[in-house]
Image: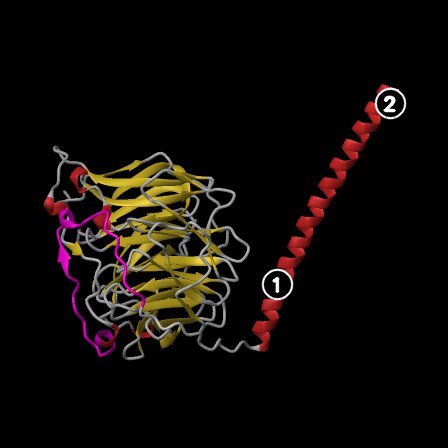
Amino acid sequence: MSQSKYRNLYGDEYRYKYHHIDLCKANTDGNKMAINNKFMALAWEYDRGGIAIFDPNEYSYGKPDQKLIKGHQGKIFDIKFSPFRTDLLASASEDCTVKLWTIPKEGLTQDLKSDSQTYLGHKRKVCLVDFNHHAADVVASAAVDSTVQVWNMIKAENYATCKINGNPTSLEWNYDGSLIGATDSEKNVTIFDPRANNIVLTQKVSDGRSAKFVWSGENTFAYIGICKANEREFKNFDIRKNSENNDNTNELFRVKIDEQVNVITPYFDRESKLLYSIGKGEANVNVFDFNETVPKRCLNFPTNNPASSFVMIDRKYVDFNKNEVDKMAKWTVNNEIYYVSFYVMRRKVEYVPDLFPHIPIPKSSMTFEEWKNGENKPLERKEICEFDRNEFITNDDKFEKRETTKANITPGEKYQNLQNKLIELEQGIQKLEGLNSNLRKKIQEEEADVERLENKAN
């Protein structure tokens, strides 16, 4: 019998808190949602890429004159809040750029068009972005040009670049912020050390499709995807073990999830060691407990609304007095956003310290220079009940506002970009022709009505 303290996990789905949500419909492996204790950011359906900001603690709805963060020239593919600041947001876009935005404390009362920084190093659309959770002023991005780039946020310049084998499908910093890992469309995992400018591991982890990964420990990562037998699965690997000729000898275990074929998105809670996953267009949330020797499914929670995307809320903002160990915001296929909470069933509903290991405070453990020089300092931690849930954390921007030179685009890439723009223009013309046809039909109907009324009057 399982001895894990999370074995009696159960879920609860709230009624929707947001409706009339017009999220960006671009197909992406990034996340169109980001959330902290003060803001919920949503990639909006806007022709040149916009981001809407809502209060996550109040009932909200989209408006016809919705105020947006504007500044990109293409759709938004991924957004992330800084782990050290409430008001700092990073966005990755189709326009080949990564931008940083500083959100006013009161939210958006007007469109925000001035970014804090712009990074112009990628040649193709940028799909993913992720802040370093230990070192200040370090952020990474991955793009369709098959590169992962690490940025010095102070000077707005590229610090290191890693080549991967295909289009990126996931991107995440490891536990101590020393390594960045990415998966690509060729089902490879690449682990990169940006300080040594060295690839630690490149490994093909699947013979199927839809490979994504999350760090499951200091030196282990979990791949999640669909194998050749059309089974969804996850595997756990240890980067300290050599895997010669991609024979996966560093594989620790494999766990079958189900036999569905939809793309699945994982999230790993590093404090509770619980792996959450949702398939695109599915309503069920699967939770696996990594506190076991071999992870076991501790919950298959059937929600009422199929999900298109989800984001986990930082653990410091859960209701610990009700044994709520994790909470997610879920964007449904009906353009509504629901909250889903996960509780541990206990005889008494009260704060149980052993369910909540000490968690990191929102303060970096290293400066950029310390991190650059090879230091690895642990984050300061404290009990969850000691956090101020309403604290707004900001800093005076020390970023250098500098435009870097845009990467050279090859003639082939320029031609492809023009082709894509031509397709978009043709689609726009078809849409306008359809509207014109409907208007002509309506005018003809109204003219017929007028003629009928005139004949009746005569």
Q: Position of residue 137 (x, y in %)?
A: 29, 69
Does the magenta run of residues contain 390? yes
Q: In this rendering, would 104 be left or right of 395?
A: right
Residue 96 visible (yes or no): yes
Quadrant containing the N terminus in the rendered view: top left
Does the magenta run of residues contain 367? no
Q: In this rendering, would 171 be left or right of 407?
A: left
Q: Which residues, given as a range, are shown in magenta?
A: 370-397
Location of residue 26 with respect to 95 vertically, above or below: above
Q: Residue 175 falls in which quadrant of the image?
A: bottom left
Indicate the secondary structure of the residue bearing disc 1.
Answer: helix
Which residue type carries mark 2? Answer: Asn
Marks 2/1: CA–CA distance: 51 Å
Name the residue: 48% across, 42% down: 63
Q: Position of residue 51 (x, y in %)?
A: 44, 53
Which residue type carries mark 1? Answer: Lys
Residue at image mark 2: 455
Taking depth in this image into account, of 95 and 250 the one nearest to the observer is 95
Q: Position of residue 309 (x, y in %)?
A: 40, 48
Q: Residue 393 falls in which quadrant of the image?
A: bottom left
Quadrant containing the C terminus in the rendered view: top right
Q: In this rendering, would 200 be left or right of 22?
A: left
Location of residue 284 with respect to 167 vertically, above or below: above
Mark 2 residue crowding within 10 angstroms, few (<14) / some (14–19) / many (20+): few
Colouring: secondary structure
Q: Main secondary structure of the magenta part?
A: loop
Q: Position of residue 230 (x, y in %)?
A: 41, 52
Residue at image mark 1: 421
Name the residue: 22% across, 55% down: 270
